[in-house]
Image: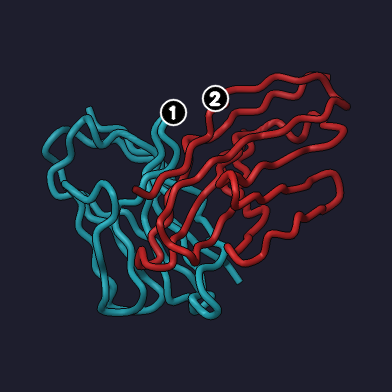
Chain colours: A cyan, B red
């Protein structure tokens, strides 16, 4: 099992550019989510999904889009990058059986927007 | 409001000291789940414990122990005889049952353990 994988590990963008952060899991988990981590603010939920074809907004969704066409993949799209989106992004997945369970996190993507 | 407060931003201890990391949560749901995660300097997030709101038993796992008290809405984490490898940022998290499985994280507590 590879667990949760994220690509790329590092990315530098210019203001206004768009890009997609990739996330994949091979554990057949229903739940997947994207967080951003900023100093002193913990992890904040951007978007999440409870299954293929179902997505919803988290705490800080503006400027980001997601889709979930398969159970395995949950890409995060930055539509027009802004310096405020400089952050470390984590993707996570978890099973939903039995209620809310531990999340398995990817290694993170460090994004810098100039 | 649903919220997790970790009031201690940074804690510094000397190896072998005991240390308690505080976590206070707010939710109106009667069913909810609490978690602790560790983020070592390498950056990955590691799950430590899950507790649901109906299970108030304290838990011990080696040098780690957790004290869940619904009366004070707290879920504190104690490391006994700390070691340098315990140096990390520790996050407390809440998932209310009626929140669509949205996770609310605290801001984290950075623990430094000095040799």
Q: Position of residue B35 (x, y in %)?
A: 58, 54
Q: In this view, does A103 lie above or below B79?
A: below
Q: Residue at x 81, y 19 (%)?
A: B14
Please name which of the two marks, 2 or 1, marks the residue nearer to the observer.
2
The residue identified by callout 1 is A40
Chain hosting mark 2: B
Q: Nearer the viewer, residue A58 or A20?
A: A58
Q: In this view, does A110 lie above or below B67?
A: above
Q: Residue furthest front?
A: B71
In terms of image quadrants, where is residue B24?
Answer: top right
Disc 2 packing (10 Å; few <14; some 14–19; many ≥20): few
Q: Where is residue A103 in the image (x, y as percent from the top left)?
A: 53, 61
Tell me the distance, in whole angstroms, between the alpha carbons under discs 2 and 1.
Answer: 8 Å
- Asked if both marks, 2 and 1, belong to the same chain, the answer given is no
Q: Which of A95 and B58 is in front in this view?
A: B58
Q: In this view, does A100 lie to the left or right of B58?
A: left
Q: Residue at x 77, y 55 (%)?
A: B59
Chain hosting mark 1: A
Q: Is residue B89 above or below residue B36?
A: above
Q: Where is residue A104 in the image (x, y as percent from the top left)?
A: 54, 61
In terms of image quadrants, where is residue B112?
Answer: top right
SS at badge 1: loop
SS at badge 2: loop
The residue identified by callout 2 is B9
Q: Position of residue A27 (x, y in %)?
A: 54, 75
């Amino acid at each position: 099992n590879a667990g949760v994988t994220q690509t790329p590990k590092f990315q530098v963008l210019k203001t206004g550019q768009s890009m997609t952060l990739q996330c994949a899991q091979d554990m057949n988990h229903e739940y997947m989510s994207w967080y951003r981590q900023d100093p002193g603010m913990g992890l904040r939920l951007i978007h999440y999904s409870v299954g293929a074809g179902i997505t919803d907004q988290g705490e800080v969704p503006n400027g980001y889009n997601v889709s979930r066409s398969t159970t395995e993949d949950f890409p995060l799209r930055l539509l027009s990058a802004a310096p405020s989106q400089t952050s470390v992004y984590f993707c996570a997945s978890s099973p939903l059986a039995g209620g809310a369970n531990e999340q398995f996190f990817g290694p993170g993507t460090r994004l810098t927007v100039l | 409001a649903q919220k997790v407060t970790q009031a201690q931003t940074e804690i510094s201890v000397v190896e072998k000291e005991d240390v308690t990391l505080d976590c206070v949560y707010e939710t109106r749901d009667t069913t909810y789940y609490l978690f602790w995660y560790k983020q070592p300097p390498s950056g990955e997030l590691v799950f430590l414990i899950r507790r649901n709101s109906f299970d108030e038993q304290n838990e011990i796992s080696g040098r780690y122990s957790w004290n869940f008290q619904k009366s004070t809405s707290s879920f504190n984490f104690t490391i006994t005889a700390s070691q340098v490898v315990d140096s990390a940022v520790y996050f407390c998290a809440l998932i209310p049952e009626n929140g669509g499985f949205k996770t609310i994280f605290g801001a984290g507590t950075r623990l430094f353990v000095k040799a």
